[in-house]
Image (spheres, rainbow, N blue to C red):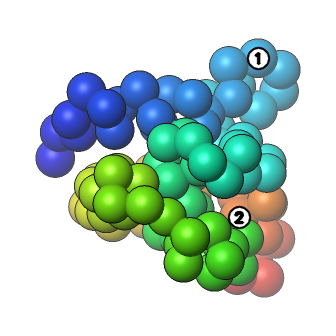
Amino acid sequence: MSLSATAQAALAAAISTRGPNKGKLLRNAPKSNTHACAAWQGAILSVNPYKASIFALIMMDDIQRAIFGEVQAHFDAMPKAERIKFDADRATLEACGVW
């Protein structure tokens, strides 16, 4: 499933670009008034739902909701093995056999 240009830019802003977690979702959500936050919430709901913020979901505007839905559908379409690699905490819990 391909993402729109807006969703791609938002998701790129929600992914770490440096350090040991490069290529993974940011540990914490970006600022709530950004498209990156909507993309992060959509991705994290598929990857590690315990980190999702209900308040951020409630306060989204229409554009953020569209980005959220698009990114969530994109991550839901991924195989589980690929999806869990985007969150360091989820990957660690899976490796320990706790999840």
Location of the C terminus (image quadrant) = bottom right
Residue 78 shows in this picture = no
Judge by depth and name the residue closer to the eye, 69 or 90.
69
Q: Is residue 46 left or right of residue 25?
A: left
Q: Is residue 97 left or right of residue 65?
A: right
Q: CA distance from mark 1 to mark 2?
A: 19 Å
Q: How many marks?
A: 2
x 57%, y 42%: residue: 34
Q: Quadrant of residue 7?
A: top left
Q: Is residue 77 above or below residue 12?
A: below
Amino acid type shown at disc 1: Arg
Residue sitting at the far left: 1
Q: Is residue 39 above or below residue 14?
A: below
x 49%, y 64%: residue: 60
According to the picture, the residue beneath numbered tag 1 turns out to be 18
x 63%, y 80%: residue: 54
Earlier sequence position, callout 1 versus callout 2: 1
Where's residue 12, x and y in %? 50, 28
Q: Closer to the camera: disc 1 or disc 2? A: 1
Where residue 26 is drawn, which disc sits there? none
Judge by depth and name the residue closer to the eye, 79 or 64.
64
Residue 6 shows in this picture = yes
According to the picture, the residue beneath numbered tag 2 turns out to be 90
Mark 2 residue crowding within 10 angstroms, few (<14) / some (14–19) / many (20+): some
Where's residue 89, x and y in %? 79, 60
